[in-house]
């Protein structure tokens, strides 16, 4: 099947285009599975499906045009010598194929995550999984600080280096994800965000502001997604780890490209991040389900809510 016209317009060819189409199909299938897997009650609740679809479309359009404006702002400002320019100038601006590809992919990803976030949060609240009890803020901040510090120290302990680059740490994400599952979204996302800032201090590689947001702010803050699975912490760990890997994979493909010998930046980025963050996530999951570890964490949790 050929897509010559689209390939010429977007500057995408070969496996990159098929991966993009596959990602779109997978996103639709995943949303459908999440909606339909909740049973008869949810299938009758058409409003949830309507809201999810509306969020997806709205997020895509807003992010698409926002990125378009960002991409053209500097050039148009220079062209009009500081004078104002209209929306028509933004649409008529000659974007490069790389800009088009970046805009399309980022918009699809932002829309997908906005829609999935709504479905996950809505489901968690409907099931009463999100913690509603009043928590001791001082105790939460203390335990949160301990979790961030522990995660930061563990991130310096490298178990081994991977062939494609990067390394595997000693369960460095686990303290953040477990704390998020215990404390709920408010404290959980705050701890994950703070951990991301510490990673910047530890040593950040920045080539673009959007890459910085994806690799450090969004990727590490995504660890807070574990907060929506307090009764299924294993699922929360897996969800949070995969979410971080997705953000880093997008950043790698769009801004870093492929290494020598790789035909696709997307395949290389997925392989790179899968062999680092992906394996890190699996190791965190294995460590959590080990009976002595799980029992010890259970005792800590009891102290937290005592």
Image (cartoon, rainbow, N blue to C red):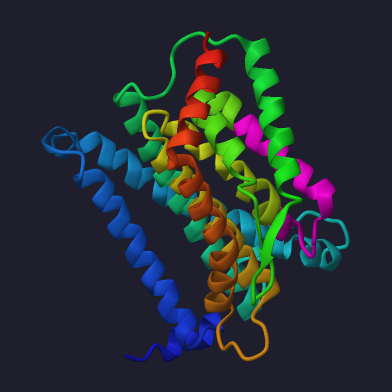
Closer to us: 15 or 62: 15
Give residue 166's quadrant in the image: bottom right
Q: Position of residue 199 (x, y in %)?
A: 76, 48
Closer to us: 170 or 254: 170
Name, please, the residue furthest toward the right. 81
Q: Position of residue 296 (x, y in %)?
A: 52, 28
Where the N terminus falls, by quadrant?
bottom left
Give residue 102's quadrant in the image: bottom right
Closer to us: 106 or 35: 35
Q: Is residue 86 visible?
A: no
* Overall secondary structure of the magenta section: helix
Residue 177 vertical position relative to residue 305 in the rendered view, above or below: below
Name, please, the residue furthest toward the front. 292
Say left or right for 217 vs 33. Answer: right
Q: Is residue 172 visible?
A: yes
Residue at figure coordinates x 49%, y 80% from the top left: 16
Q: How many marks?
A: 0
Residue at figure coordinates x 43%, y 53% from the top left: 112
Closer to us: 8 or 82: 8
Q: Position of residue 92 (x, y in %)?
A: 63, 71
Say left or right for 97 vs 278. Answer: right
User: Residues in magenta?
Assistant: 189-212
Q: Position of residue 127 (x, y in %)?
A: 29, 25
Give residue 194's quadrant in the image: top right
Say left or right for 306 vs 143. Answer: left
Residue 48 is covered by the magenta coloring: no
């Amino acid at each position: 099947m050929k897509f010559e016209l689209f390939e010429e317009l977007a500057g995408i060819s070969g496996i990159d285009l098929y991966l993009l189409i596959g990602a779109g199909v997978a996103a639709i299938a995943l949303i459908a599975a999440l909606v339909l897997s909740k049973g008869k009650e949810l299938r009758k609740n058409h409003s949830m499906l309507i809201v999810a679809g509306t969020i997806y479309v709205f997020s895509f359009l807003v992010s698409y045009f926002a990125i378009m404006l960002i991409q053209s702002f500097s050039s148009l400002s220079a062209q009009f010598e500081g004078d104002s320019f209209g929306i028509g100038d933004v649409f008529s601006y000659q974007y490069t194929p790389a800009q088009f590809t970046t805009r399309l992919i980022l918009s699809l990803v932002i829309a997908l995550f906005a829609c999935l976030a709504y479905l996950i949060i809505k489901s968690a609240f409907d099931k009463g999984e999100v913690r509603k009890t009043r928590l001791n803020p001082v105790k939460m901040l203390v335990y949160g600080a301990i979790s961030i510090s522990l995660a930061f120290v563990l991130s310096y302990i490298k178990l081994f280096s991977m062939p494609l680059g990067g390394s595997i740490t000693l369960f460095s994400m686990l303290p953040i994800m477990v704390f998020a599952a215990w404390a709920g979204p408010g404290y959980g996302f705050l701890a994950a965000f703070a951990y991301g800032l510490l990673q910047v201090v530890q040593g950040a590689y920045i080539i673009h502001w959007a890459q910085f947001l994806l690799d450090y702010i969004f990727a590490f803050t995504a660890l807070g997604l574990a907060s929506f699975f307090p009764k299924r912490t294993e699922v929360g760990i897996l969800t949070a780890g995969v979410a971080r890997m997705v953000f880093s994979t997008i950043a790698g493909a769009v801004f870093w490209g492929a290494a020598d010998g790789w035909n696709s930046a997307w395949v290389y980025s997925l392989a790179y991040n899968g062999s680092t963050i992906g394996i890190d996530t699996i190791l965190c999951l294995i460590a959590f389900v080990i009976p002595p570890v799980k029992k010890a964490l259970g005792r800590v949790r009891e102290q937290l809510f005592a």
